[in-house]
Image (cartoon, rainbow, N blue to C red):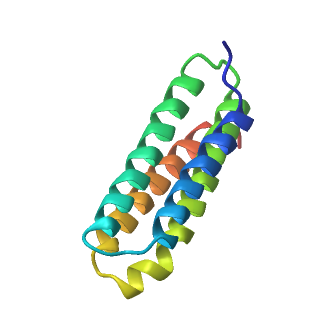
């Protein structure tokens, strides 16, 4: 079984849909915390998949492309939380964690791109 970059889009879309659906059902009785924890866990899982995906890739440009995809995934997750973080202080920690993962992915992308 081979994992491809398009599979990351599928994982991202499914995670965001679950989050959006959970938020649409209402943010009451701690459900926001649960939805945030789930979204963050799914992003961390995608990050681990990216680590494995690039592990045996010999081409530096391809590795940079993989990390660029992770940056985009993080950006889309962060966009979902940006407004919520302003309205609900509880979102701030998850938003910050997403940005931390984004920064780590961006650092790895820069490390592997050719000058």
Is 15 drawn above or below residue 54 in the view shown?
Answer: below
Q: Please state the horizontal and vertical placement of residue 44, each as a whole percent of the image.
A: 42, 43
| Of residues 108 and 26, the one drawn nearer to the viewer in this rendering | 26
Does the rendering let one see residue 113? no
Residue 114, picture quadrant: top right
* Residue under the image location 31 percent in, 75 percent down: 28
* Residue under the image location 39 percent in, 87 percent down: 87
| Of residues 60 and 27, the one drawn nearer to the viewer in this rendering | 27
Is 114 drawn above or below residue 83 in the view shown?
Answer: above
Is 30 drawn above or below residue 68 in the view shown?
Answer: below
Name the quarter where the C terminus is drawn.
top right
* Residue under the image location 47 percent in, 63 percent down: 22
Name the quarter where the N terminus is drawn.
top right
* Residue under the image location 35 percent in, 63 percent down: 94
Position of 14 with respect to 89 (left or right) is right
Q: Residue furthest top?
A: 1
Residue 92, picture quadrant: bottom left
Position of 3 with respect to 77 (left or right) is right
Is 113 drawn above or below residue 62 in the view shown?
Answer: below
Q: Please state the horizontal and vertical placement of residue 20, each as a whole percent of the image.
A: 54, 65
Does the rendering let one see residue 95? yes
Position of 112 with respect to 101 (left or right) is right
Q: Please state the horizontal and vertical placement of residue 71, each as a whole percent of the image.
A: 59, 53
Q: How many marks?
A: 0
């Amino acid at each position: 079984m081979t994992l491809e970059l398009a599979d990351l889009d599928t994982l991202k879309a499914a995670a965001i849909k679950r989050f959006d659906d959970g938020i649409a059902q209402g943010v009451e009785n701690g459900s926001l915390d649960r939805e945030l924890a789930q979204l963050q866990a799914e992003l961390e899982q995608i990050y681990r998949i990216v680590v494995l995906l690039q592990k045996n890739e010999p081409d530096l440009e391809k590795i940079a492309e993989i990390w660029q995809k992770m940056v985009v995934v993080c950006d889309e997750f962060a966009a979902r939380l940006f407004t919520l973080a302003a309205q609900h202080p509880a979102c701030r920690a998850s938003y910050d964690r997403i940005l931390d993962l984004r920064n780590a992915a961006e650092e790895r992308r820069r490390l592997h791109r050719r000058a």
